[in-house]
Amino acid sequence: MTESLNPPLSYEASATTTHPHVATTLPQEVIACLKNSRFLHLATCDGLTPHVSLMSYTYLPSTPYDQYPTIIMTTNPSSRKTNHLLTNPRVSLLVHDWVSHRPPTRAPNPGGQRDGSPPPAATRSSLASLLLNLNTSALSSISTTITGSARVLETGSEEEAWYKERHLENNTFEEEMSFLGQQQQQQLGQRRPSLSIGDDARVVAVRVREGRIADWKGGVRDWQVVLEGEDQPATLLDITSFTRVSNLQQTLTTRLLAHKKFIPTQGTTPIAPPDPTIITFTPNPVYTTGRRDLPPSNTTPTKSTTLSLPPPLEPIRSLLTSPDGAEYHPTLRGGQTTYHGPGQMVAYTILDLRRLGLTPRCHIRVLENSVIDVLRGYGIQGLVTDDPGVWVPPRSGEEGIPKKITAVGVHLRRNISSYGIGFNVTQEPMWWFQQIVACGLEGREATSLEGEQVEGVEIGEVAGRFVRAFVERVNRDFACGGGVTGEKIEDVYSVKEEDLV
């Protein structure tokens, strides 16, 4: 029996990339959904305060300002969603292309005065019956979610004026109007605007690049748009459970350690060692501690269920115990307390250092220098200081001290490395960093590519650049020849989680 294209919805389907569709255009179902619907749900967030709005919108396959499909919306400059967008541009959009049936409600108790909704068939008008019948049939079979970054366009700019004009055109239509019980047909070609845009309204543009299709049976599929000439990713980048990545990392390190213990007997063929692996991912919001900030020991039996936290995290205990807050995970890596989450590219290197000709100190330097190589590609100077991590100096003409753009922390066991770096791509992690003294460094600030005026960079792109930079550094400085003994990394290939476990 062949596998269904849209399997029943399950935890795994919800938590992982499912049936990925990567193409140069949107899936036809998504195009139809965006064209047929008139409203969408816009979800924004500022820190821990989410907000959802019902928005009219315009869908454009491309614009003179962006080759990607674009969604246009307008918003009041003083609204909550506008404030959210200005501080956190990451958004989620939900677009439905069907109207679901709402079963009739009943009176709250026998003999109640309310008949329920909708009213019984005997008291319904013919129009109400028609609408109810329509409501029981799906107009289409899918909805789509879209994740991305929103741009609040510059007031008075040529781009804003162009988007406003398209938005008004899209929300102007011909229709029959009912007035005082009489049908009045509008003159042919006469059009009525369904919305107006005030002079002070802000225009919001969202680039459509990736999302998920869900059908009425619960099946899900992921999709992504990659224009010609761009590198096509092996998998879609998604928010990943930190626990899942930790478990995967443990599996990979255990295999490398087991191979070290394996001693082939005479006449047997040696087993090739597992390949070095770099896991790149973006986790759900999580604070992690290194060995220097481990919480008090929990080895003594106790009936207490209170979460044991190190002193640096006690001030934000409520944030770590809230359902909408962050997780907390103690780890064995070096260093102290830091944050990982959306807007950040995390890379964990699971390597046999001796096989690659790396000492522990060299491994740290390769991680740092690889990040500096990536920053240089974006026109940013990166540097290392006496403090751990990679830093960015003040921009030309500005005063101040360097800001941290990447945290570095690793763990070694018998020269097998784990953990790695946390590279800030967008400004989204900044609020979370402000809640703690990151890495125990009082008065030091964090920054990101976006904070250094490099906007519109995808986390997957940064991950690819980092992996390439790391491999080039290892091969150039530590592999084969010139008195070095490390093995060369011959090839880089992408794998999925199911291929590793």
Image (cartoon, helix red, strand yellow):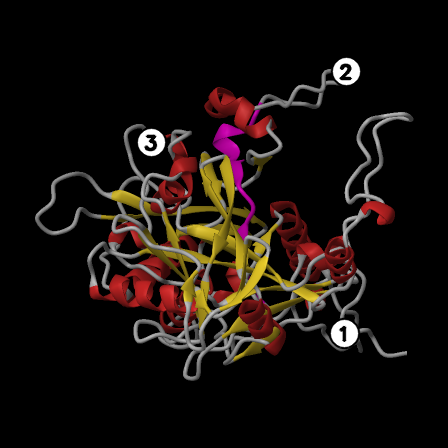
Point out the stretch of residues depicted in magenta: 276-295
Labels 1 & 2 near each other (Cβ < 8 A): no
Reading the chain from its start, which is encountered first: label 1 or label 3? 1
Q: Horizontal and vertical percent for residue 391?
A: 28, 47
- The residue depicted at 60 percent of the width and 52 percent of the height is 240
Reading the chain from its start, which is encountered first: label 1 or label 2? 1
Q: Horizontal and vertical percent for residue 165?
A: 31, 66
Label 1, label 3: how far apart the Cα atoms are: 51 Å
The three-letter code of the residue at mark 2 reads Lys
Label 3, label 2: how far apart the Cα atoms are: 35 Å
The three-letter code of the residue at mark 3 reads Leu
Quadrant location of residue 163? bottom left
Reading the chain from its start, which is encountered first: label 3 or label 2? 2
Q: Which mark is residue 5?
A: 1
- The residue depicted at 55 percent of the width and 49 percent of the height is 283
**Is 134 displayed left or right of 277 in the figure?**
right
Labels 1 & 3 near each other (Cβ < 8 A): no
- The residue depicted at 82 percent of the width and 35 percent of the height is 115
Q: Inspect this view and state whether residue 97 appears.
A: yes
Numbered circles on residues, count: 3
Q: Disc 1 vs disc 3: which is toward the camera?
A: 1
Label 1, label 2: how far apart the Cα atoms are: 48 Å
Q: Which of 228 and 277 is in front in this view?
A: 228
Residue at image mark 2: 303
